[in-house]
Amino acid sequence: MMRNETLLQFLKRESAIGVLLIVSTVMALAMANSPLHSFYSYFLSIPVVISFDEFAIAKPLLLWINDGLMAVFFFMVGLEIKREVLEGSLQERSKVALPAFAALGGMLVPALIYGMLNAGDEGAMKGWAIPMATDIAFALGILSLLGSRVPPALKVFLLALAIIDDLGAIIVIALFYGHGLSLAALGTAMTMALILLFMNLRGVTNNTFYILIGLIMWAAVLKSGVHATIAGVVLGLLIPLRGNRESFHDLEHSLHAPVNYIILPLFAFVNTGVSFGSVSASDFAHSVTVGIAAGLFFGKSIGIFLFSRLAVALRLGKLPEGVTNAQLFGVAILGGIGFTMSLFIGSLAFECSEGVCFSLVDERIGILMGSLVSGVVGALYLSAVLKKTKREETREG
């Protein structure tokens, strides 16, 4: 189990990340809707080329951020998942069932709501997974802002829920958002993964070797048609923890600052610049927009809460000590803050292919709407519930 002081340090950091993401989003929206919009568009399309002999990767800056820098984010996610499973909040099976059921409900119900609203539209159905995601930084950041009134067990529950949710999103990306598979490149990537596994089993603990081979694996995955960020997750899971504990934790810690304070804000900046000059009232009522927003706000809260109650009813899990159903529902609402992960899945679902882009509506409108409402309502609801709990405890005391 994570030590309480370590958890509190993590949660304090998340509140700062949330502020940075908001600032990045406001800047992107301001630039996209001002005379600076041409500069913003140019920035996203700056060509960047890396080549070695006949091997070359040529992409605009936007895709280098989404495919390259976000692979570093997913690398950190892979490390965090491994740590939590081996020595953290996911280590004890008895404590995994509740957040696992909650995460499952938080993925299935939003996808179902989106599917119901977009059934029969093949193009729109590409976005079915967008409302499945939870942004761990924003959700935990809001909990941190509510202060010491929040039971520590509730924070740990949300942390475990978000980690399992991330794992579910990774699986969805790997299975459903690949395109034009190259067997040669995929074979190279799998060979690199097997080498990493062999090194792990043989007790190699030099992280530098893992990262070098991981870079080759990332390039191969990028060329394979499977999304390149999957390479980051695989690398994170294959770096040894046992027998390499101090080095593992140092590596994970070294990633927090660049990922949380540079990569994620930069990702938010380049992906949230919605130009409202081209947005009409009908766009807000479009089935894609409504499906994403409703999936995040209603789907997440209903799915997380009902599946949590189902786990308790089936005696597969129990509410954390000191946590009430009302508080659990508040966290379920916060689960609807999709933001970073939803934006990422949206960029995959409706990405341009061979110059052809999905143009019925900008999916980012629904993501911003659903995440904003979930964050505001969740914070207000939880604040009221926690104040009521505090008054009741004071009377009983």
Image (spheres, grey):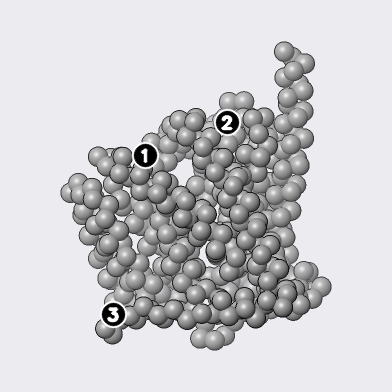
Q: 53 or 87: which is nearer to us? A: 53
**Horizontal and vertical percent position of residue 347:** 56, 70
Res. 52 mark: 3
Q: Earlier in the sequence, mark 1 or mark 2?
A: 1
Q: Secondary structure at mark 2?
A: helix
Mark toward the viewer: 1 or 3:
3
Q: Quadrant of the C terminus?
A: top right
Residue in view at x 45 percent, y 76 percent = 179
Residue 230 is left or right of residue 394, and the answer is left
Tell me if mark 1 has few (under 14), some (14-19) or many (20+) residues whose alpha carbon lies within 10 angstroms of its own. some
Badge 2 amino acid: Pro
Whole-Å distance between the Cαs marked 1 and 2? Answer: 21 Å
Res. 86 mark: 1
Badge 1 amino acid: Leu
Q: Earlier in the sequence, mark 1 or mark 3?
A: 3
Q: 256 or 152: which is nearer to us? A: 256
Please report contact status of discs 1 and 3: CB closer than 8 Å, yes or no.
no
Mark toward the viewer: 1 or 2:
2
Looking at the rendering, which quadrant does residue 235 occupy?
A: bottom left
Residue in view at x 43 percent, y 67 percent = 68
**Horizontal and vertical percent position of residue 214:** 31, 62
Res. 152 mark: 2
61, above or below 367, in the image: below
Looking at the rendering, which quadrant does residue 188 occupy?
A: bottom left
